[in-house]
Image (cartoon, rainbow, N blue to C red):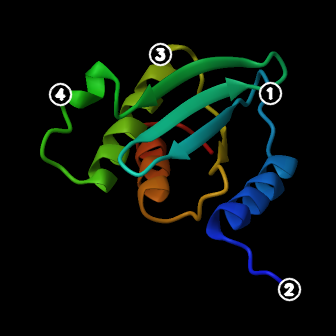
Amino acid sequence: MSKRNSKAIKEIRHRRVRRKVAGTITRPRLCVFRSLNHIYAQIIDDSNARTLVSMSTLDCQVRGKTDGIGKSEKAEVVGTLLAEKALNRGIKRVVFDRGGYKYHGRVKALAEAARKAGLEF
């Protein structure tokens, strides 16, 4: 019996989450992707297969505010700006898709910052 590597375990976790979570017009899906250095977040309407709002640490709005701070603090900035952008487009309620990542660290920081900025999960 071979051991599963962490990438395979993440993929299994991601499939399990996506079976339960789907975005609709009234309540789109907030999807998170975390790389080694950056974090990306999108609000997606799965019924029309469209991205409504997106934000990442690579956006010019975020880059100016994140010089010299840690990755979790960058995730908080991304979550806050994403929530503000979503509220401007009329999106108040979302379902959270953690993307197979455990709910701690940068993923948790982004989610809590988005909640604090006004999004309802």
Q: Earlier in the sequence, mark 2 or mark 3?
A: 2
Which residue: 86% across, 85% down?
A: 1
Q: Nearer the viewer, mark 1 or mark 3?
A: 1
Q: Which mark is residue 24?
A: 1
Residue marked by disc 2? 1
Q: Is residue 93 above or below residue 86?
A: below
Q: Earlier in the sequence, mark 2 or mark 4?
A: 2
**Circle 4 Cα neighbour tier, 10 Å, few/some/many (<14 / 14–19 / ≥20):** few
Q: Is residue 99 above or below residue 63?
A: below
**Mark 4 to mark 3 CA distance (whole Å):** 21 Å
Q: Nearer the viewer, residue 73 or 33?
A: 33
Find residue 97 and report its horizontal and vertical position in percent.
Answer: 67, 46
Residue furthest toward the bottom?
Answer: 1
**Circle 3 Cα neighbour tier, 10 Å, few/some/many (<14 / 14–19 / ≥20):** few
Left or right: residue 108 versus residue 91 is left
Callouts 1 and 3 close, C-beta under 8 Å: no
Q: Nearer the viewer, mark 4 or mark 3?
A: 4
Find residue 109 and report its horizontal and vertical position in percent.
Answer: 41, 54
**Mark 4 to mark 1 CA distance (whole Å):** 33 Å
Residue marked by disc 4? 64
Q: Circle 4 — which element?
A: loop
Which residue: 57% across, 30% down?
A: 42
Residue marked by disc 3? 88
Residue type highlighted by circle 1 = Thr
Would you identify the image quadrant in which residue 96 lies?
Answer: top right
Callouts 4 and 1 close, C-beta under 8 Å: no
Residue type highlighted by circle 3 = Asn
